[in-house]
Image (cartoon, rainbow, N blue to C red):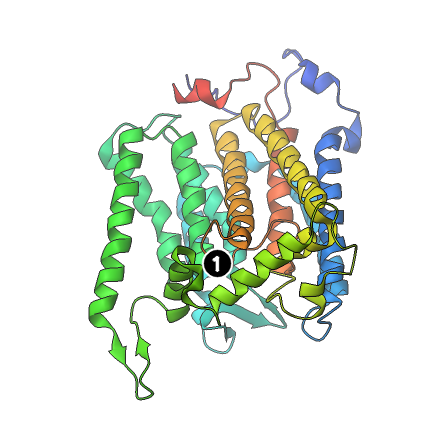
Amino acid sequence: MAYPTPQIGPLSSSQPASSHQRKRLPGFLGNLNFPFLLNVLLLVALGLTVVYSAVSHDAETYSFSRQAITVAIGMVVMLVVWHFDYRRLENMVAILLIINVVLILSPHLPVIGVESKGAQSWIKVGIQLQPGEFAKVTVLLLAASVMARYGGRLDDPREYLKALFIMAIPFLCIMTQPDLGTGLVYLFIDATALVVGGARPKYLLLTIAAGVVAILAILALDEVLKYQTASGNWEYRLLKNYQRNRILVFLDPSADTSGSGYNLRQAQIAIGSGGLFGKGFGNGTQTSLNYLPEAPTDFIFCVLAEEFGFVGALVLLGLYLGLIYQSFKIARNASSLFGTLMVMCVVGMWLFQILENIGMDCGLMPITGIPLPFVSYGSSFMLVNFVMLGLIGSAWKHSAGTGKKSMYEIAR
């Protein structure tokens, strides 16, 4: 059953207010979901606490004040987006696609493009920004807009291929940098949109199988095309050496004891040494002695686990669970399929980033540059997550007054 056409304007007086609406306070406060915001504030506060400890040992590279200012700006941005009617973004596939391409390819522009750690992923316009991070917003809006056109059911194989092609364009663009970590986030957003949007399971399984075959083909072709440099080292043409090393280390942690394998080993030591209650705030030896690489960003969970122990890790996971649960409820009550898809794409993105970041620290997932939502250091990443919160808040503010349907009813 499809959603009724969403109403952009206010509900008419003839429409009965639901109990969901009657519980809201009047005015500005009535448009805020306080349990949701409390969960967010606790999560951000824990993140700032851990970042403060992590950056205090490397003040030349990182700035806690910058992170705190970013959070303050993010709060304002969240409230602005919260009070914007997200439904106005529906049916903008062409515009969203153009914005995605321009954003993701902008680091290749001369003068403003900046290369860092082997990737052309940054631009410098007074301040240094990562457009691929901000494109996560337009990627999920694009995926939600594409799948909303099918009313919760996508059976036509030609339409499926068409939707798949449109949603794959941002991934192809990000791989020109290359930024595999961000590209994987794009793919997971698209996968969430396809599943929630009602694509047939058969098509999804065939897509996954084709993806596995493509990865194996790339690895095999890279072996054929590799060449030896003047220094005697082997270089690959399709995948960077560090990307291949991360895959090898995931399969065999002892394969690279001085590179990715070393990072994984130090991460596991930090997590294990935290014990039940941790070593105490600011007392993590792996961080303070600089054994743990990229502690404020990629391996921030290790800092938390070492200083606050298993209990601290459980608190973090509990806050994430609360955020996901409340977002899921908002998705179910959205006034349009586009709203449900939008919120669920945010949920899918967060779940992937949480599982990948914590999983790589524990050796359960390959090491990537995917940060931990609301905890890892980084201005672009933090601002994007607050925009996502604003979109979820907008979906809650404009949720249906009557006739709410779950996403499972839509998919039938």
| Mark 1 burial class by Cα count in 10 Å: few <14, some 14-19, many 20+ | many
Position above or below: 139 against 367: above
Q: Residue 195: x and y, percent? A: 39, 32
- Could you tell me which quadrant the C terminus lies in? top left
Circle 1 residue: 368
Front residue of 319/350: it is 319
Q: Is residue 33 left or right of residue 236?
A: right
Q: Residue 273: x and y, percent? A: 67, 55
Q: Residue 149: x and y, percent? A: 38, 32
Q: At 52% across and 25% down in the image, what residue appears? A: 6
Front residue of 404/385: it is 385
- Could you tell me which quadrant the N terminus lies in? top left
Q: Is residue 75 visible?
A: no
> Disc 1 residue type?
Thr
Q: At 75% across and 23% down in the image, what residue appears? A: 24
Position above or below: 338 against 3: below
Q: At 69% across and 69% down in the image, what residue appears? A: 62
User: Which quadrant of the figure has residue 190?
Assistant: top left
Front residue of 297/276: it is 276
Q: At 31% across and 76% down in the image, what residue appears? A: 235
